[in-house]
Amino acid sequence: MSTGNPRRWWALVVLAAAQFMVIMDTSIIGVALPEMQKDLGFSQGELQWVFNAYVIAFGGLLLLGGRLSDLLGARKIFNTGWVVLIAGSIVAAAAQTAWVEVAGRAVQGVGGALIAPAAMTLLMMLFADDPKELGKAMALYGAAAPAGGTAGVFLGGVFTEWLSWPWIFIIYIPIGIATLAATKLLPAVGSRRGAVDVLGAAAVTAGLALAVFAIVRAPQTGWASTSTVLQLVGAAALLVLFFVIQKTVREPLMPLGIWRVPRLGSANLAMTLLGAAWIPMWYFLNLYLQQVLGYGAFASGAALLPMTGLLMIFMTAITARLMAKFGAKPLIGGGLLVLAAGLLWLSAVEPTGTFVADVLPASLVAALGMSLAYIPAMMAAMSGAPQEQAGLASGIVNTTYQVGSALGLAALTAVATSQGAGQLGNLPALTDGFSAAFLWAAAIAGVGGLITLLVMRGEKAEAPSAAAPSAQDEHVRA
């Protein structure tokens, strides 16, 4: 009989709800983008900042959030994250201009970067005494991610169609307040001494933001222009500075020795390319449905439910069984190739297309590929890590997915814009731009699949029971 916290399962509900909301925050805006574009004056190229502002802040600060959770106490950082997320939601909901909206989304991303690692640390604290219970808790916590993605797509359509787009942010305010009220169920941990690598966090986040900005602006300023070149060089310098800092400071965000873990490098490369292909597909598919096929917000959200439903079913019920039988390598490589096939199919969209012929079958194929690759890549990154570094490995692989998402969306938006996606109302030009984005996303996914099959070591990647990091360990970053 377990001797763990008697309220641990109720606490898990709070943590799973947090995971649900953080993931929903990345999907709920999709169907609202055209309405936000009209009301706030975003250009077609700038519109991606509504998504990327969140992703850059979230991905760039995840490791810092984990470190703060270690030092200041996971529950305290979890609560702080929710306060920040609520503040960002208020700004985003009240925004009257494009860049105030972007600022609100960035603040939301900061909140998410505090919530996610603290929630994982708290989960480990609650269930570390019993490996079987820990496995069940991880499965339930993991299921909250696809559930949040599915709910976000649907609720975004409902709020935008029958209320207004600010409601996709207003919804976080009462939910956040209720979550804060329920955090008394979570275990309290005192703070402890240690250094925070603020300079490293600033360097990696600024480098990522500058790289995305340069790529977004390149179609207007020119890829060979002085400003674009200087911005890309500056971004590269900041990212190099981050690695130099990690090598020289006593308590880095990301100890470089972690990269000696088997398959961590190949799994992170796969996750980077997976994010770079999947997120642009989801983004441009929303725009194709609304700006070319003429769908309203609710209809667009409903049209994506079959895809997100398939994701949820496979991720929670099927992928783990396939991984136990075949191992991670064939699922990651094969999943990326299946995703590439779905994206290649989507690249054939027509200005006079239909949902049934042009969108539904191709999107289901793409979703199948994503659902096959995502969890195995996560497990492959973590399975070789020793107990004291499992949380760090998880944090890194989450970060690389977010970085890939941001850079991929920026690059493919530049591609789409150069091929005509900026010409609102011109259905053939819009379709050409979206088609080009799908085609290049297919190439990214295909390259990722081939590299995985050629490079990754082939042993099976089980979720190691011993890899659950202690809540007191300073390396917990998940």
Image (tube, rainbow, N blue to C red):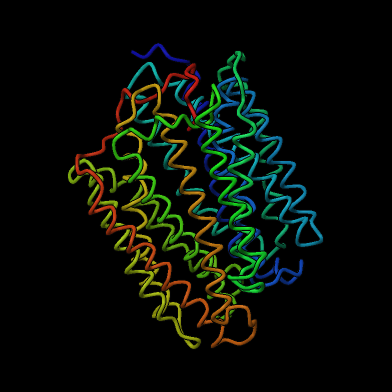
- Counting from the top left corner in percent of width and height, residue 312 is at 40, 51
Q: Foreground residue, 301 or 286? A: 286
Q: How many marks?
A: 0
The answer to which quarter of the image holds residue 166 is bottom right
**Relative to 398, is 186 on the left or the right?**
right
Q: Is residue 441 above or below residue 350?
A: above
* Residue at 37% from the left image edge and 68% from the top image edge: 443
Tell me the quadrant of the picture where the N terminus can be found: top left
**Relative to 428, is 368 on the left or the right?**
left
Q: Is residue 102 visible?
A: yes
The answer to which quarter of the image holds residue 99 is bottom right
**Relative to 300, is 34 on the left or the right?**
right
Q: Is residue 161 visible?
A: no
- Counting from the top left corner in percent of width and height, residue 379 is at 33, 39
- Counting from the top left corner in percent of width and height, residue 375 is at 35, 45
* Residue at 53% from the left image edge and 36% from the top image edge: 244
* Residue at 69% from the left image edge and 69% from the top image edge: 35
The answer to which quarter of the image holds residue 383 is top left
- Counting from the top left corner in percent of width and height, residue 95 is at 79, 56
Q: Foreground residue, 117 or 459? A: 459
